[in-house]
Amino acid sequence: MYWLIEDPKHIETICNISYQTAYVEVIPTSHNLHPVENNICALYIRFERDDKGYIIPINHSETINFDLEVVEKVLNSIEKIYVRDRKEFLHYFCIKHSYQPPPSPHTYIPQLTTAHNYIYNKYPTIQNLNTIVPIVKHYEVCEQNFANFDSSNQNPFYNKAALVFNQLELVGIKVDQILFEQYFNKEVNEFIYTQYNLNTLTTRPSNAFNNINFSALNKYNGERNCFIPRNDIFIEMDISAYHPTLLADLLGYAFDGSDIHMDFAKMYGVDYAKAKEITFKQLYGGIWKEYKELPFFKKVAEYTDSLWESFQHNGHIVCPISDHKFIKNDLENMNPQKLLNYLLQNLETANNVLILYEIFKILRGKNTKLVLYVYDSFLLDVDENEINVIEQIKQVFRDKKLQIKTKTGKNYANIK
């Protein structure tokens, strides 16, 4: 069978074989639109033990194109589908039996052909350019992508994480279009979309798209005024003392009071704000001599030493909840404190995946939406007729033994 599938009989042949596994890659119509706003140009499929892949065209200028329903029939005939990015794949096809590798610090970047680069550079403002890039050039890129794909390393937790972040991206954030153009010099539609990436050193997701870093929006220059609720009000829930809470749970340590930073203030003999600063510096920079005999930090030191010994001896550590492995040969310039920080950031992210999953269950069918997540902060776009869901969401945090602070505002800048 030729690599370019244009005969319906070949589609029937594929479906009747019922392949057990295949690598699949979506070729979008636009190379720079967010997947939520994009369409499909073609689909690349490489079946198990086959010596080449195939392209099924959907919207390309050179080919006989198939309806999307035909392509979905092919995908549903395959028992297990491997993709490079399940979160992105789910924007195009809601298929449960899709799987991706776990996050890696070594992100693979596809190498485009000269034809791709020439067309993209010549027509920078035109969308849907992939429909005129020669189909054979798409095939060359996909064949190379498959050659650099490893399906042997699987972690079920990150398939769940992909679903959660897919749902988070799908919602979008409403913007004041005039203000947005003023601050970001971009013309946009009523909603813009975030894009989370777990392929970072610590697996803590970055969140940026179209040169907008949603994880680091400026609090002082007014740009946050651009982001407004589609419903009535923003409600932001911030987790207090998140990393100390997670670490205490790992250590089996119980703080005395309901406010962890206040407990630290009593331990140090300083005020509340200074206690937060001292704790932050010790968790990320190492325990200070004057506090190393405090029971909490003695346990931290013992745990850090044990973690480092395991890392050195086994060549890796396995993180709680996610089962993610930090592998010694993949990481540079490691030390005991840095390893603890990596583990805590992974644990934070994994715990948040579970929290987000529960929140999405609560919000199913509701007007209220979760529109942004930044590490220890969750931004809700709330319909005031559904205010009862806020108490249900707070209970999710209480069930995780997490302390939260709640703020409200009419835009993202004035949340108080």
Image (cartoon, grey):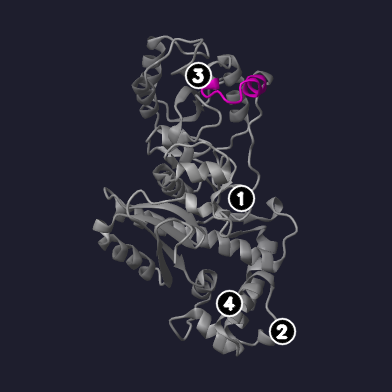
- The residue where tag 3 is placed is 55
Residue 117 among those drawn in magenta: yes
Q: Which amino acid type corresponds to the residue marked 2 in the rendered image? A: Lys
Q: Please state which of the two labelled residues, at mark 2 or mark 3, is closer to the viewer.
A: 2
Question: Looking at the image, is 244 positioned above or below residue 237?
Answer: below
- The residue where tag 1 is placed is 200
Q: Earlier in the sequence, mark 4 or mark 3?
A: 3
Q: Which amino acid type corresponds to the residue marked 1 in the rendered image? A: Thr
Tag 1 secondary structure: loop
Q: Earlier in the sequence, mark 1 or mark 2?
A: 1
Is residue 153 among the parts visible in the rendering? Answer: no
Q: Please state which of the two labelled residues, at mark 1 or mark 4, is closer to the viewer.
A: 4
Q: Which residues are magenta?
A: 116-129
Q: Which amino acid type corresponds to the residue marked 4 in the rendered image? A: Lys
User: Between marks 2 and 3, how big is the CA–CA gap?
Assistant: 63 Å
Query: Closer to the camera, 172 or 356?
Result: 172
- The residue where tag 2 is placed is 289
Q: Please state which of the two labelled residues, at mark 4 or mark 3, is closer to the viewer.
A: 4
